[in-house]
Image: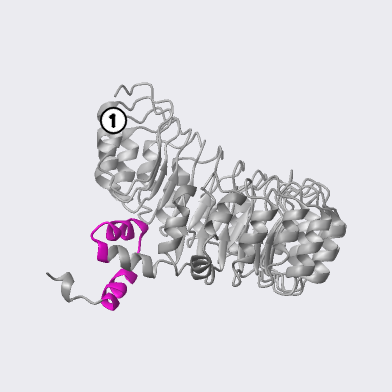
Amino acid sequence: MLLSVLTEDLLIRVYGKLGSDSDRKTWRIVCKDFLRVDWVTRRSLRVLRSEFLQGLLSKYKNLDTLDLSVCPRIEDASVSVMLSQAINSVSWTRGVTRLVLSRASGLRYAGLERLVGACPCLEVLDVSYCWVYGDREAWAISSVGKLRELRMDKCLGVTDVGLAKIAVGCGGRLERLSLKWCMEISDLGVDLLCKKCLELKELDVSYLKITSESLRSIASLPKLEVLLMAGCPFVDDYGLQFLENGCPSLQVIDVSRCGCVSSSGLISVIRGHSSLAMLNAGYCFSELSANVLHCLKDLKNLKTIRLDRAPVSDSSFQTIGTNCKSLVEIGLSKCVGRISALANSCRNLLSLKLEACDKVTEKSLDQLGSCCLRLEELDLTDCCGVNDEGLKYLSRCSELLSLKLGLCSNISDKGLAYIARNCTKISELDLYRCTGIGDDGLVTLSSGCKKLTKLNLSYCNGVTDRGMQYIGHLGELSDLEMRGLVNLHK
């Protein structure tokens, strides 16, 4: 009776207040009127089965985002079906600005050309992990004149020729480009890209066989804010020197796993960009020099730093914490220093990644629990010093949303109970191979952590059928890993 007096406009306003996907899913199954409101207002569609594609597109006519990345059988023939009826074709494609075709390797040149050509407002295109894509597909992409963002990760057949086509066709507007693992692209292609795409703000050339000559070209980009170049084995300190006087807008740089980069090259980057907000130099250094630590004091806006596997001493931790007051995220995987000084100085931390740090102790976790009360994400995977008493201290971080404790063999149900009682906002919990966790831990978890959406219990051999019954009480759980649970029988 109440629904009969609510106009469609009012229902649309109510629908707009729904914050989560689960709430919107519940809305759709209430009644046909609610379903029709969903048809009218929904802007994003992720299709799982290609046979339902045409029917869905005939109903959802106001889309701006279409995601076909999990639709495994999408191919050229599917595009013909999608665009077969001219009226429907115009209605749903006219407003599409974002198209996600990641892993859609069955869709080749002809289908791709037709699909992107039918979307006149297309601004964002993702064809990442379409490993068979080459220069012909790049030619099809180059016809999208309004393209602002393009992801081509692991398009293994794309060469400098294909990149040149995209640079010429889309260069006037292109702002974000990812070429990660496009192994056929060389310095020549990057040089042409940088000459044609002067609007670029974000560029990912990670794991390419480019040399420092590419950095000479990249340094000429006046608006570049984000440069990701992880795992580039031929980039060295000489190349980073070009960046010192180039890319005046640079805020984020990733040189992790660049084996020829040393402290000297990093100093060049820091000297030229005092406004850096993120610096990733993980797996680069056998020694972190005092000069680098001294230069960090100039990065007043630095919010994220990753120094994975760097030999960071206690005094270095203290220097980082003292000089970089704005830090909210730190990555120190496999580091050998103690984190107590860091926790005491960086009290605004939101994210801390300490995988395989052998110096994490009860004292460290006590410091974290006392000083870093805003912490939302903590990774303690394979930290052998974590035990139940440490989790008791850590449970004071009541804002935690993500906690990874995989391979922490010294924790038990007792420690998990501390977390479950005090960290009730947690949505992601990783207990991979925590052999001390059993049914009693899941009992407290199910009553305390009602917001869990992702849980990994793989190889927690203490878990039995009794414990799994309590997992059913977690109403928002959408991702559960339970490999190797040998004591489950039902």
Q: Position of residue 210 (x, y in %)?
A: 83, 52
Q: Position of residue 362 (x, y in %)?
A: 44, 41
Colour convention: one colour
Residue nearer the viewer, 205 or 303 = 205
Asked if the stretch drawn in magenta spans residue 323, the answer is: no
**187 w.r.t. 217: above or below:** above
Residue nearer the viewer, 351 or 57 = 57
Residue nearer the viewer, 216 or 322 = 216
Asked if the stretch drawn in magenta spans residue 16, the answer is: yes
Span shown in magenta: 8-33
**478 w.r.t. 411: above or below:** below
Which three-letter amino acid code belongs to the residue tagged 1? Answer: Asp
Q: Residue at x 34, y 71 (%)?
A: 16
User: Which secondary structure type mostly characterizes the magenta part of the structure?
Assistant: helix
**441 w.r.t. 55: above or below:** above
SS at mark 1 in the image = helix
Q: Is residue 245 left or right of residue 468?
A: right
- Visible in this render: residue 246? no
The residue pinned by badge 1 equals 439
- Visible in this render: residue 422? yes
Q: Residue at x 30, y 45 (%)?
A: 420
Q: Residue at x 14, y 71 (%)?
A: 2
Q: Position of residue 44 (x, y in %)?
A: 46, 63
Task: Classify residue 482 by image quadrant.
Answer: top left
